[in-house]
Amino acid sequence: MSTKKNAAYNVAYRMFSVLLPLVTAPYLSRVVGTDGVGLYADAWTMSEIFCMIGMLGLADYGVRTIAQVRDNREELDRTFSGIWQMQLLVAGIALIAWLGYVFLAAGAEKTIALHLTMMSVSCLCSFDWCLMGLDLFKPIALRNTFVKLAAAACVFIFVKSKDDLWIYAFVWSLATLLGNLSCAATLKGRVTYRRVSMKESLKHLKPCAVLFISVLAVSIYRKMDKVMVYNIAGVDQNGLYENAEKIIYCLSGFILAIGTVMMPKVAHMQKNGETERIASHIDRTMDLMICMVSAMAFGVAAVADRFAPLFFGEDFRYSGTLMIPLGFTLIMIGFANVIRTQVVLPQKRDHIFVKSVCCGAAVNLIVNLCLIPSMKSMGAVVGTLLAEMTVPVVQFILLRKELPYKRYIGYVGIYAAAGGIMLGCVRLAGSLLPGNSWVNLGIMTFTGIAVYGALCLIIWKVKGESPLR
């Protein structure tokens, strides 16, 4: 399948995956309130941490490794079998640890956490890394979409009060497991399990563990934020931060989707020695990525204060305030993602990725400890901003002599200027519209799309090229 089709399927699925919970979020927010949302966020975050441990660094290592051997069926089968055996071992240990946490350490969230157990079970049969390495994005998108639509329907049917919060947890946990099982069926005929020695299987453990260090570091400022806000600032502040971050996470789905599609493609080109084609590919992707994330960041800043109370309810008005600075992390995430998925990982220079995210995690942890006690959820926002800024800065320090960073930074300047003009036009349109309603928000959104789209056409005309070429 072509890169464009893979990207389309993956972008559509990623966006669907994060938009669907957003469809249920306003309903859940009104049913369980800020403390209910905060309680669920804490349990879900802990579940994600154990799942992250269970999957180790397979999200990157597995995709890259399968992409490099997919042209040789015998080597593919052995590689797949070795990686999966290692996955069963690590995910099994993580599942036992999760059950220990639920029964021995969990507090008020214990009941919710218990019904999230199938999240950890699903790690035993998660084969997304193999499907993506084989460029099979369509089955992941279609099968999981059906399962998650059914899950959303169950939420509206069965969740009626705060006492039903465990049902919400159970439904999404079960949906994850069923989605993984349905995708596993796609591998039939494409790859065959062959028992390999434990020694051969465990050879994948070290490179996975190296990448896991970076995964763990990222989790500190993308998951531990909520744990720290919950324990330091309280459940209400965690609920506000959870909903603000949820919107930004939704938008970052575009970034992750494009990077996920590009990594196996570039890894395959890297193995074939297509150096010039890779350089062109990186430049084009960076241009497109910065164009997209600048639109998102400045767009969020323009409408967040109106969007939050309309979408989540008046109790979550402050979530809009949090979203405004948090949205600008998208530019940094997009920039760093292109370098990571098209330069660092395909070239097996994992140490660069590890160093950059570890530095980001350290900055985030220090800032959170300093600011959350006084600034509460806004302190976590500042910590996330500085952490996401640290990652591309460290990458620049380590790769400045190898990549045309002046050209890349030029893209940021050009599209940020366009985004700033768009923001001004949207805020001006909003000031002319009385009150706050979905109609007014729609007019503001359309204004932003029209202005930014027109400015991009002008930019591409002046440059004489478009990233969509």
Image (spheres, rainbow, N blue to C red):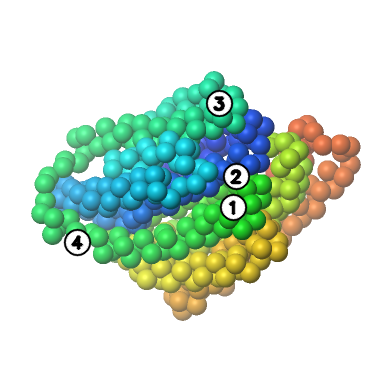
Q: Which residue is mark 2?
A: 38
Which numbered disc, 1 or 2, marks the residue that appears first in the sequence? Answer: 2
Inter-mark Cα distance, 2 to 4: 40 Å
> Is there a contact, CB below 8 Å, between mark 1 and mark 2?
yes
Inter-mark Cα distance, 1 to 2: 7 Å
Secondary structure state at the residue bearing disc 3: loop
Q: Amino acid at mark 3?
A: Val
Residue 157 x, y percent position in the rendering: 54, 20
Query: Residue visible at 41% across and 45% down?
Result: 102
Which numbered disc, 1 or 3, marks the residue that appears first in the sequence? Answer: 3
Q: Nearer the viewer, residue 28 or 360?
A: 28
Inter-mark Cα distance, 2 to 3: 17 Å
Q: Amino acid at mark 4?
A: Lys
Disc 2 versus disc 4: nearer the observer? 2
Q: Which residue is mark 1?
A: 230
Q: Amino acid at mark 2?
A: Gly
Inter-mark Cα distance, 3 to 4: 46 Å
Is residue 71 among what the camera can see? no
Secondary structure state at the residue bearing disc 1: helix
